[in-house]
């Protein structure tokens, strides 16, 4: 398993690009199946939270919902131009809020656990007597 360390911007780009591609793939394979899109969103949330570097941990729960919305662009139903597409996007966000909240919660929990572990390691390193 690769172990990349993404910056805050890199994790946002990674998550947004992957979700846009998965949204397009879901649109082609499953039509407008927002459930398939939501299921594919969860592993992307986990990877984003695991691969973000220590200094940018708090960016993962922020970029995940933004990427969810970006990925909905190719999947959301909409007809009648820009206004119809925007209405389809808003409707998809409203009806798929469970997936959005679930993925954000997963990313947040992973980030909190990583942050607690980092604080404990720093505290343990500072508590050692000098040799």
Image: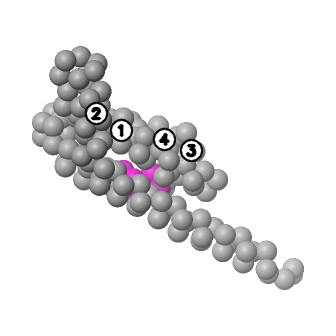
State yes or no: discs 4 and 3 in contact (Cβ < 8 Å). yes
State yes or no: discs 2 and 4 in contact (Cβ < 8 Å). no
Q: Is residue 123 above or below residue 8?
A: below
Alpha-carbon distance for marks 2 and 1?
8 Å
Alpha-carbon distance for marks 3 and 2?
26 Å
Q: Which mark is residue 56?
A: none
What's the residue at 43%, 47% (across, down)? 64
| In the image: residue 122, left or right of residue 39 | right
**Residue 28, percent from left and from top:** 15, 33
Q: Which mark is residue 69?
A: 1
Alpha-carbon distance for marks 1 and 4?
12 Å
Q: Residues within 10 Å of mark 1 (few under 14, many from 20)?
A: some
What's the residue at 24%, 46% (across, down)? 95
**Residue 86, percent from left and from top:** 29, 27
Q: Earlier in the sequence, mark 3 or mark 2?
A: 3
Label 1 secondary element? helix
Q: Which residue is mark 3?
A: 8
State yes or no: discs 2 and 1 in contact (Cβ < 8 Å). yes
Residue 18 covered by magenta stretch = no
Q: Look at discs 3 and 1 and give the one toward the viewer.
A: 1
Q: Which mark is residue 89?
A: 2
Q: Which residue is mark 4?
A: 12
- Quadrant of residue 1 within the rendered picture: bottom left
What's the residue at 36%, 35% (across, down)? 70
């Amino acid at each position: 398993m690769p172990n990349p360390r993404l910056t805050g911007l890199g994790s946002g780009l990674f998550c947004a690009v992957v979700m846009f591609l998965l949204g397009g793939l879901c649109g082609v394979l499953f039509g407008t199946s927002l459930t398939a899109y939501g299921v594919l969103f969860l592993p992307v949330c986990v990877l984003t939270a695991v691969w973000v570097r220590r200094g940018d941990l708090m960016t993962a729960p922020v970029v995940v919902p933004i990427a969810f919305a970006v990925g909905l662009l190719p999947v959301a139903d909409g007809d009648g131009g820009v206004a119809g597409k925007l209405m389809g996007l808003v409707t998809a966000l409203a009806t798929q809020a469970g997936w959005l909240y679930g993925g954000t919660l997963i990313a947040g929990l992973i980030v909190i656990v990583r942050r607690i572990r980092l604080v404990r390691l720093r505290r343990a390193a500072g508590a050692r007597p000098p040799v």
